[in-house]
Image (spheres, rainbow, N blue to C red):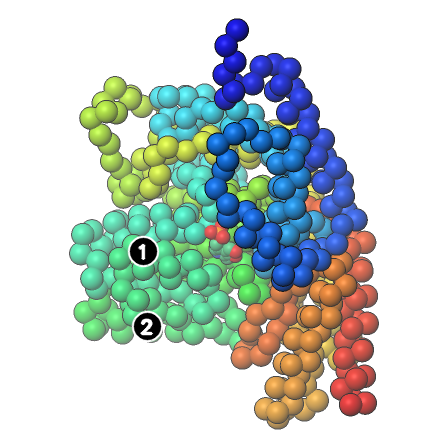
């Protein structure tokens, strides 16, 4: 019998699948004890990177050897899936989502047009509707699409807003956001053809929230100058500090000034599943569009974002398009074609990796995990606030705590010395390889941030984080005094 190497038989599929599964289970179990960062030197890393740049061979390789190489690559990377990852916005990657994705990739159904795989399109639409209506509280005509991430979601939101409010004439369109907005907002505006100097950074209040009065003043001044303000972007959980803009006030402002109101809730959105989050994230109901990232606060694997909109027709109007080769592709009832709501045509059934875990674990499991993150955040915020050598400048709105070494006095040189000490604190804390923190700049000061998002981060690791930070702060301050 002829053997087609690209089609392994049942025994081979079982062997190969078993090898991969075993390795993944080992790796997943080890996540709890592995270092939080990779231990490789720059030289080893450079050699490994170089070795991965080589082209594929003409002849077959060996799966076990190749998987070993993948492990080398995985170990030569920030451990983004582990419980100690408290840097940037962590994304844990649910095991059950990975299983869903294995199934998804193997059956390889077409995700762009509903008529080609109608039940899968409905499955995906159920995830979108759940996010739009149940999580965000948008009306029953709301909908949207799953994207590869928050940046793509915001891009489609800006394109829809531009199409709806400006039509073809985009030259005078202006956008309003803050310095604490994620850079994907300005990038989306530029990609959508908005001039760079028409992207306004509205001043913020002392609490790092957009100042609605300052926004109103800017909008009116721009309009007087002949520009066309069309889009207001609020942030629901800033990447720097986790701060939530005053969303109800921004919603009223957008309505008054006739602007499209978008909320970037890539990080914060799913906290609405919790009672505390829902209270702090009031105002979603009034948005025209909202970005959420299941690959952040729904613990999905990277490559899973979402855009939900009040009125799907606006998204469709901006992203519609077809070709003769699609003339026989009818609509599948109530279920929209995701390809007509965003820039992509062919893609996987993106909703499958969310649908399976949501149905398997139930929504309460996600709610409880997010509630746990809020508890952990309150705990470490309270603990660090009691360390006299640390400045903890604000109450966390969500699951991010910012802090830095307190300067000896109010003078600029003391602030500089404190900034340098804070940078050393980051290096020393991360060097233990039990947790990874990252930094940002707040009020011109070098500031550390702890962001608790992974479903694998629990009380023990946060207590350890607190002890490490406290001990290293004491060490740095003592050395500064002695030296
Ligand atoms: C608030 C916020 N918006 C947008 C993004 C961009 O999302 P993505 O990285 O999924 O494109 C991020 C990513 O960290 C974010 O924190």
Asked whether the viewer can see residue 455, the reply is yes
Q: Nearer the viewer, residue 464 or 215?
A: 464
Q: Is residue 445 above or below residue 177?
A: below
Q: Position of residue 266 (x, y in %)?
A: 50, 52
Q: CA distance from mark 2 to mark 1?
A: 23 Å
Q: Position of residue 304 (x, y in %)?
A: 51, 42
Which mark, residue 447?
A: none
Residue at the spot 80% in from the left edge and 60% down from the top edge? 464
Q: Nearer the viewer, residue 39 or 438?
A: 39
Mark 2 lies within 8 Å of ligand 1 (Cβ measured): no
Number of labels in the image equals: 2
Q: Residues within 10 Å of mark 2 (few under 14, many from 20)?
A: some
- Image quarter of residue 374: bottom right
**187 horizontally vs 448: left or right:** left
Asked whether the viewer can see residue 276, the reply is no
Residue identified by numbered label 2: 218
Q: Quadrant of the C terminus?
A: bottom right
Q: Nearer the viewer, residue 13 or 417?
A: 13
Q: Position of residue 405 (x, y in %)?
A: 69, 79
Residue, far top: 1
SS type, badge 1: helix
**237 horizontally vs 12: left or right:** left
Q: Is residue 459 above or below residue 302?
A: below
Q: Is residue 70 above or below residue 360?
A: below
SS type, badge 2: helix
Residue identified by numbered label 1: 191
- Image quarter of residue 230: bottom left
Residue at the spot 29% in from the left edge and 54% down from the top edge? 192
Residue at the spot 80% in from the left edge and 78% down from the top edge? 475
Residue at the spot 68% in from the left edge and 35% down from the top edge? 24
């Amino acid at each position: 019998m002829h053997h087609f190497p690209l089609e392994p038989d049942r025994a081979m599929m079982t062997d190969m699948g078993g090898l991969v599964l075993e390795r993944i289970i080992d790796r997943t179990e080890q996540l709890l004890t592995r270092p939080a960062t990779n231990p490789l030197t720059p030289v080893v890393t450079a050699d490994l990177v170089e070795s991965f740049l080589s082209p594929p061979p003409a002849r077959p390789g060996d799966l076990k050897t190749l998987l070993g190489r993948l492990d080398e690559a995985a170990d030569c990377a920030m451990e983004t899936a582990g419980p100690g990852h408290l840097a940037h916005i962590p994304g844990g990657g649910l095991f059950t989502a990975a299983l869903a994705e294995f199934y998804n990739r193997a059956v390889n159904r077409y995700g762009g047009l509903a008529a080609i795989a109608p039940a899968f399109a409905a499955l995906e639409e159920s995830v979108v509707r759940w996010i739009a209506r149940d999580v965000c509280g948008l009306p029953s005509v709301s909908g949207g699409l799953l994207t590869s991430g928050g940046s793509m979601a915001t891009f489609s939101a800006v394109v829809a807003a531009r199409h709806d409010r400006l039509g073809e004439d985009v030259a005078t369109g202006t956008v309003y956001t803050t310095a604490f907005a994620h850079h994907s907002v300005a990038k989306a505006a530029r990609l959508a053809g908005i001039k760079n100097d028409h992207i306004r950074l509205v001043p913020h209040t002392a609490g790092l929230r957009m100042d609605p009065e300052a926004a109103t003043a800017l909008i009116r001044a721009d309009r007087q100058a002949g520009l066309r303000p069309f889009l207001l972007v609020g942030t629901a959980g800033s990447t720097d500090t986790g701060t939530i803009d005053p969303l109800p006030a921004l919603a009223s402002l957008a309505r008054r000034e006739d602007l499209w109101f978008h909320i970037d809730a890539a990080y914060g959105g799913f906290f609405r599943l919790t009672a505390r989050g829902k209270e702090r994230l009031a105002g979603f109901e009034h948005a025209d569009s909202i970005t959420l990232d299941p690959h952040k606060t729904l613990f999905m694997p990277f490559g899973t974002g979402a855009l939900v909109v009040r009125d799907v027709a606006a998204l469709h109007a901006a992203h519609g398009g077809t070709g003769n080769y699609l003339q026989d592709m009818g609509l599948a009832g109530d279920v929209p074609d995701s390809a007509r709501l965003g820039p992509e045509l062919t893609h996987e059934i993106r909703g499958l990796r969310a649908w399976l875990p949501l149905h398997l674990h139930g929504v309460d499991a996600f709610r409880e995990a997010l509630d746990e993150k809020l508890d952990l955040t309150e705990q470490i915020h309270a603990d660090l606030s009691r360390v006299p050598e640390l400045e903890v400048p604000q109450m966390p709105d969500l699951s991010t705590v910012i802090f830095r070494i307190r300067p000896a006095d109010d003078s600029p040189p003391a602030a500089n010395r404190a900034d340098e000490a804070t940078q050393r604190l980051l290096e020393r804390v991360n060097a233990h390889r039990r947790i990874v923190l990252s930094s940002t700049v707040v009020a011109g000061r070098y500031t550390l941030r702890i962001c608790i998002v992974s479903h694998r981060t629990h009380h023990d690791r946060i207590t350890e984080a607190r002890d490490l930070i406290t001990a290293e702060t004491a060490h740095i301050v003592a050395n500064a005094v002695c030296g």
